[in-house]
Each structure stands twice: as structure tokens, then as C-alpha cells.
Image: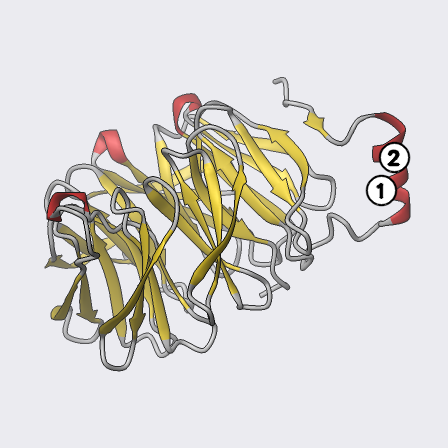
Amino acid sequence: MSIPSNRLLPGIAATALLVASPALWAAGTGNVYVSSEDDDVVTVLDGENLEKTDTIEVSERPRWLAFSPDHERLYVACGDDDSIDIIDVDKGEVVDRLTGIDDPEIFAIGPDGKHLYISNEDDARFTVYDIGAKKAVTQVDVGQEPEGVLVTPDGKTAYVTSEVANMVHRVNLDSHEIEANIVVGNRPRRFALTEDGAHLWVTNELSGSVSIIDTESNEVTDTIEFDPDGFRPEDVTPVGIKFSDDGSQAFVTLGRANHVAFVDVASREVQDYVLVGDRAWGVALSNDGGRLYVTNGLSDDMSVVDIDERKQLRSIPVGRVPHSVVVDTASE
């Protein structure tokens, strides 16, 4: 099996940089990683100055990105190659590949780092995958077009969205059985779990909303709707969601409405809308928690947003059709 080679900075300059800065690729640097669906690469940006330092070749159509719990490996879902590539963060290159995984798009890594939990969109299944053994442990039938996956910090529960069924499935990871099917808005996509685990926020792309689920009762207890000025309702398509480090704010990317919504978590009121690029999709927090990184799939760039000032600071080209963005924070 041929593993794509890493394309670092050219020649002697790259060697000198690596010798002078041995911690450049070490876990916890704050480096930013962005997947590019049409270029089949993961772009790496320096965590301090956001200058491009590398492009790492991966398999076809990279989308979701997630770090191992120790941040030594970065996993990349490559849908058109039915694989998940594994990047060694220290080396900055692909070192292994998990194959035979049908059209992986979104996945989560368990807190012990031993299992992947994968949505298989074409098969309407949720797969539990043993990383060490390189094989599926089991598959659970869910609603059509599953996408978002979230595993609770205790590793006991997974939540999976079904875009067609307008449903969130709660899966017991001990028994691998569905414990609850929770109806939410139209075309649910991604999740964020409050720090206390009491509430699960779910973006609904075609409803222009977020459903808030009480994780004890498995019921939707509140709905937040978005209405940025100048956009038709059908253009308001929430996908990405992230909580601030202190849990007081939620940041929701609004897709074709080209904005990020700032939501007060306690009151569940929309506080502001910040204009970014075309089709705002993925979202991540900087290492210091002061900036948002937003991938814009139709303008082929990443917006850098100042959270305190609530404005875009700059736009950075990151390849064609950027999908996801993650930040190499300190080990969890």
C-alpha cells in the first residue's frame, strides 16, 4: 500500500526550519489543520501567525478531522476512497490508513482512543470500529443519511444524526443498541454537548435552527432560530457548532447565509451575526480561545473571527472546498 508523501517546505529551507524549531509539529502547538475536499490535502497553518506551513496529501475527498485524545494522531475521513487516513502530528505525514470503511464522513474517537464511531451515509448505519484491529466491531442500523456523531466524555453513549429522518439516535455503546430516537428539526447535522452533559445542541440545516435536547429525558426542550438580515429563510442553513471555552457562548455557522451566529447559552438568545465567507461550514476555536476559525466551502477560504470584537479579522485561502478545521490544542 502506497502512502502519500508529505509535502513540506522546499529543500534546505524546510530542513533548517525543522532543525531550528523541533516543536513545530509537536502536539499542543495551536497549529490549524483544514481539509480540502477537491484538493485531497490537509492544509497546515502555523498557530501563531496563521501562515501556511504545509500541505499533507491524503486520500480522495477528505472531510471530517479529529485528533486522538493525546493529539499525537490526526484522523481524516476520506469519503471517495472509503478510508480514514492517519496523520502523525509530529512528523506531519500520513503514516497509516484504515480501509474498507464505506463513505465515511463524520466520526468521533472514543475517550480511550481505541475506537472510532463512524456514520456511514450511504448505508444508513453507525459503525463501531476497532483501531488496533483495523476492523468493524459492529454496525447499528439508524435513519437514512446519518451524519453527525458525538461520543460522551465517559464513552458510554453516542449520538448520531439522521438527515432524512429528522432524528437524533441515542446509542448505548456497551450494548450497541439504540436507547432513544429523538425527533428534531429538518436535516440535523452536527452537535455540541454542554460541559455538564445536561444538554445537547443540534444544528438543523433546513429548519434554520438549533434543537436543544435534555439528555436525561431525551426530549427537545428548546429551539433557537436564526434570521440574519438580508437572507432568505432557505439560505439560513446551520451546520457547524462550537461552545466557547467557558461555555457561555455558542457559535453556529449558518451555511449559505455566510454568517456565524453568536448565541448566549444561558438565555439561548442570538446576540449577534458576524459576516464571513461563502457557505460557512466548519468551525473551531483558537488555542487561546479568542478567535474562531470558519471554513467557507464556496469561497475556498477560512475566516478568522475575533470573538470579543465580533468581527472577521482576515480571510486565508485554504484550498478548494474546505470542509473541516481543527486546532492542535494541548493533550486532553
Front position in the image: 218 or 25: 25
Snapshot quadrant of residue 9: top right
Q: Secondary structure at mark 2?
A: helix
* Colouring style: secondary structure
| Residue 157 as seen in the image, left or right of residue 114 | left
| Residue 70 as seen in the image, left or right of residue 218 | right
Q: Residue furthest top?
A: 2
Rendered-image quadrant of the N terminus: top right
| Residue, disc 2 | 15
Snapshot quadrant of residue 140: top left
Q: Residue furthest bottom?
A: 266
| Residue 4 as seen in the image, left or right of residue 265 | right
Residue at left offset 25%, top offset 47%: 257
Q: Position of residue 31 (x, y in %)?
A: 64, 51
Say which amino acid is labelled 1: Leu
Residue at left offset 73%, top offset 48%: 25
- Is 249 rendered above or below residue 211? below
Q: Residues within 10 Å of mark 2 (few under 14, many from 20)?
A: few
- Is 182 rendered above or below residue 53? below
Q: Secondary structure at mark 1?
A: helix
Q: Which numbered tag is attached to residue 156?
A: none
| Residue, disc 1 | 18
Front position in the image: 194 or 289: 289
Residue 142 visible from this viewpoint: yes
Residue at left offset 86%, top offset 33%: 13
Q: Position of residue 245 (x, y in %)?
A: 47, 72
Real-space CA distance between mark 2 and mark 1, rounded to the nearest whole angstrom: 5 Å
Front position in the image: 32 or 114: 32
Residue at left offset 64%, top offset 49%: 50
Q: Position of residue 108 (x, y in %)?
A: 41, 50
Q: Are marks 2 and 1 in contact (CB under 8 Å)?
A: yes
